Image: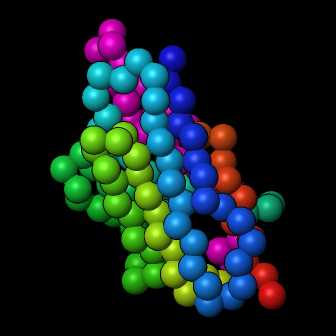
Amino acid sequence: QVQLVESGGGLVQPGGSLRLSCAASGSIFSIYAMGWYRQAPGKQRELVATITNSGSTNYADSLKGRFTISRDNAKNTVYLQMNSLKPEDTAVYYCNGDIQIWTLRRYDYWGQGTQVTVSS
C-alpha cells in the first residue's frame, strides 16, 4: 500500500501565493517522477508540472514563471510553489507519483486532491 497525501490548499486572494505539499508513504522501494495535476469544475484534469527523481522539471506552458515544482527525495515529498495566483487557477490539485513498491513493480498513484480557491 502506498498513500499520497496532499496539504497546503485553501483560499487565497488574487496575486497571492500558496505552497502545496504531497508526502508519499507506505511500501515504497523507489519513487520515479512525481507531479501535480489540477481539475477545475467542468474541465478535464490537466498537467501542472512534473519532476523526475534527478530533478528535471516540466511545466504546462501557461504556468511557467508562476509555479515551481520541487522535491525532497529523503522525505518522499513533492512541493508546488504557486505565486501570482489568478482566479483561473482555482481547481482541485492532485499529486501523482510513479512509484516502485517492494515487489519491484511500478504503479501510478494519486492523492485525494486539495482544493485551491483564488478569490477576493
x, y percent for residue 35? 43, 51
Q: Residue at x 58, y 48 (%)?
A: 6
Residue 13 occupies quadrant: bottom right
- Magenta segment's dominant SS is strand
Question: Which portion, as a residue range, is magenta?
Answer: 88-110
Residue drawn 75% across and 72% down? 11
**Residue 75, visible in the rendered structure:** yes
- Left or right of 98? Residue 63 is right
Residue ID at (39%, 63%): 69
Residue 55 picture location, percent across and down: 23, 56
**Is residue 82 magenta-colored?**
no
Query: Viewed as shown, does residue 107 lie left or right of 31?
Result: right
Coloring scheme used: rainbow
Q: Is residue 118 left or right of residue 34?
A: right
Quarter of the view holding residue 24 = top left
- For the question of whether residue 47 can be seen, the reply is no
Q: Position of residue 115 (x, y in %)?
A: 72, 59
- Looking at the figure, which quarter contains the C terminus? bottom right
